[in-house]
């Protein structure tokens, strides 16, 4: 059912201007609670009565809805008929009737369900015709507009902008009706009329038409440029009314999106300095449109990006990372990421100017797009060594690791890429491992293959740094840190360490004991971590023993004589089997078995 907020029939010439009358149908649903009945006969009889009553109510509701629909269609047609009528040039009441009709259509167009009816009944050509009011084109005394209200043009512009926002087909109908030329004239109207609130409103609504008819429509963006629509929009950025500035920036934002010719023209018209100034506005709607316009200009345009930085945009954009507006957060983070491209030297400047802390804070946002853009920007910034240390110092490692649990592929990948950058800095390795980062990467909860590949490269990067000062720092922590940290280090080093360092890590610093203790945890996850680490450690021990142990005897056999079998005399190893001791000699075992050689000469001991 289509419900209109208000509509009215156009006034008759014999009546004064009428006020809007509401025709909203407000039928409430009837609640029916069946009471407990004494007998089945009574219950059945009452149920039939209720069903009959409900059926009648439903029919009444349908009839009321149909009546309202028909009334709505009649009202819309009447308004359009008024707009299509031919009036005398000097009849003041004609202007009043047309203004009423245009105003009511603008109100009706605010409800999406009404727009189709408005378009089907031919409203678009009628509305476009009055973007240039025949009354406002007359002058009194030859030097001033006859009317400074601009109500007619404003309401027509509002209706057309709302219609264009519904679907691309309506955008083309508006352009085909010839709307671009009069809309561009409205953008220039400030030059020839008195400066009133109404005049500002019609300019703002004209900019809204440009925004909505060009949205995702490359052909119409081109038409707007060809018809001279971009220069007045750039001029409007300096208009004294903030709302007009905002509307102009929004229009430029739309026409520049994925349109290189429009981008170049906007920059050539020197729009960047004013847009940068608008970034510093306290009005979130103004700086939000400005940063959106700059973001679209910079996208895929390295030369324009350099122009934007030269215009002084870097610090204001960093400041907008702390805006209260989520959309501004997204745009600012995306723009920081674009400024920090691999071919840019802005990365270190962004870190120095305070860009890292708000980006890390934004990783905890409830808005997933804010999180995605923040992780993207941090990933770009993490390609600089100083930023790598700064991000880790401000808690970025933990925040990024937490994002690996998010199931959205782009968020996961941006976080993984940022962690890959942070792992390049030796100063971050201990923090990475202390936070449980190795276990998190090994969990393999990743949704897309590029993320999995990135994680593999990160683990390899960490592995290559487990030596020298980094290893010494980890060993120090294994001796002094709390047990949770010690365990995480032992788990990580089992996978990352060089086999030759195994003795000092797992025997001298008791890493092996920490791994074995985990097997007794009730947590299956901890048991899995421990089992995997022990298996990796055993594999390394076997490999290391095979490569580095003393050469075996050519015969691979040693015979000491029967009297030395299970004889404690000169025995150097004892096996405990089912509570019974069995004495043996290492030289015989090593010479006869690779397994025993690994046990005694490698890490098994």
Image (tube, rainbow, N blue to C red):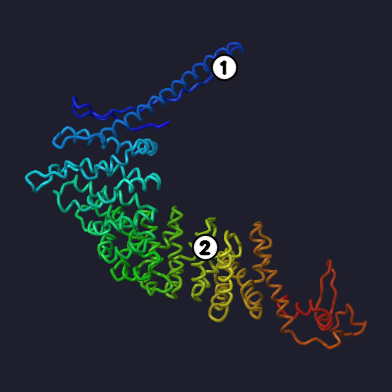
Position of the N terminus by quadrant = top left
Please state if 598 lies on the left or on the right of 164 as rendered.
right
Q: Who's the residue at 29% across and 34% down the image?
A: 80
Where disc 2 sits, the SS reads helix
Disc 2 crowd rating (10 Å Cα; few below 14, some 14-19, many 20+) is: many
In front here: 262 or 436? 262
Of mark 2 and mark 1, the one earlier in the sequence is: 1
Q: Which residue is mark 1?
A: 36
The location of residue 127, given as percent across then percent down, is: 28, 41
Q: Quadrant of the C terminus?
A: bottom right
Q: Does residue 190 appear to the left or right of 30 in the view shown?
A: left
The front one of 421 and 151 is 151
Residue holding disc 2 = 413
Q: Is residue 51 left or right of residue 22?
A: right
Residue sitting nearer the eye, 409 or 20: 20
Q: Quadrant of residue 574?
A: bottom right
Task: For mark 1, give the secondary structure.
Answer: loop
Within 10 Å of the Cα at label 1, are there few (<14), some (14-19), or many (20+) other Cα atoms? few
> Where does the image place residue 554, in percent across and percent down from the top left?
84, 88
Q: Quadrant of residue 257?
A: bottom left
Identify the residue at horizontal 54%, vertical 19% (top origin).
34
């Amino acid at each position: 059912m289509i419900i209109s907020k208000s509509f009215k029939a156009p006034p008759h010439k014999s009546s004064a201007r009428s006020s809007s009358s509401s025709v909203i149908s407000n039928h409430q649903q009837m609640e029916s609670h069946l009471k407990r009945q004494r007998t089945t006969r009574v219950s059945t009889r009452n149920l039939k009565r209720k069903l009959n009553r409900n059926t009648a109510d439903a029919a009444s509701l349908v009839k009321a809805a149909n009546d309202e629909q028909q009334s709505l269609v009649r009202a819309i047609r009447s308004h359009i008929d008024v707009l299509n009528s031919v009036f005398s040039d000097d009849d003041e009441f004609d202007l009043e009737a047309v203004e009423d009709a245009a105003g009511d259509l603008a109100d009706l167009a605010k409800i999406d369900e009404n727009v189709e009816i408005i378009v089907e009944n031919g409203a678009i050509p009628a509305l476009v015709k009055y973007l240039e009011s025949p009354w406002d084109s007359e002058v009194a005394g030859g030097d001033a507009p006859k009317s400074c209200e601009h109500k007619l043009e404003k309401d027509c512009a509002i209706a057309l902008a709302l219609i264009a926002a519904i679907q691309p087909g309506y955008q083309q109908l508006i352009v085909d009706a010839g709307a671009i030329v009069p809309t561009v004239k409205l953008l220039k109207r400030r030059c020839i009329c008195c400066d009133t609130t109404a005049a500002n409103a019609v300019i703002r609504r004209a900019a809204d038409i440009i925004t909505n008819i060009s949205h995702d429509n490359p052909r119409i963006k081109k038409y707007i440029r060809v018809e001279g629509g971009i220069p007045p929009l750039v001029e409007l950025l300096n208009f004294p009314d903030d709302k007009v500035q905002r509307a102009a920036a929004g229009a430029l934002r739309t026409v520049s999106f994925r349109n290189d010719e429009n981008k170049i023209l906007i920059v050539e018209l020197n729009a960047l300095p004013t847009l940068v100034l608008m970034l510093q506005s306290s009005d979130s709607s103004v700086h939000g449109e400005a940063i959106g316009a700059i973001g679209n200009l910079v996208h895929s345009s390295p030369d324009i990006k350099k122009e934007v930085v030269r215009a002084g945009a870097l610090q204001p954009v960093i400041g907008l990372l702390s805006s209260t507006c989520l959309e501004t957060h997204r745009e600012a983070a995306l723009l920081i990421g674009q400024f920090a491209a691999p071919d840019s030297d802005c990365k270190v400047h962004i870190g120095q100017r305070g860009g890292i802390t708000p980006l890390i804070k934004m990783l905890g946002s409830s808005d997933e797009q804010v999180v995605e853009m923040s992780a993207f920007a941090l990933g770009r910034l993490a390609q600089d060594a100083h930023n790598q240390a700064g991000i880790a110092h401000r808690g970025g490692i933990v925040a990024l690791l937490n994002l690996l649990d998010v199931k959205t592929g782009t968020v996961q990948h941006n976080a993984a890429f940022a962690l890959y950058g942070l792992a390049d800095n030796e100063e971050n390795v201990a923090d990475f491992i202390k936070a449980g980062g190795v276990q998190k990467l090994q969990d393999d909860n990743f949704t897309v293959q590029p993320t999995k590949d990135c994680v593999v490269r990160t683990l390899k990067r960490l592995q290559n740094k487990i030596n020298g000062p980094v290893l010494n720092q980890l060993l120090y922590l294994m001796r002094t840190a709390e047990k949770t940290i010690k365990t995480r280090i032992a788990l990580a080093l089992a996978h990352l360490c060089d086999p030759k360092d195994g003795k000092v890590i797992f025997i001298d610093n008791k890493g092996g004991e920490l791994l074995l203790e985990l097997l007794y945890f009730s947590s299956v996850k901890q048991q899995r971590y421990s089992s995997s680490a022990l298996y990796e450690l055993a594999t390394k021990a076997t490999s290391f023993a095979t490569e580095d142990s003393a050469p075996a005897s050519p015969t691979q056999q040693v015979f000491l004589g029967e009297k030395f079998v299970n004889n404690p005399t000169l025995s150097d190893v004892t096996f405990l089997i089912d509570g019974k001791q069995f004495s043996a000699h290492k030289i015989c075992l090593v010479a006869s078995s690779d397994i025993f050689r690994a046990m005694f000469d490698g890490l098994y001991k």
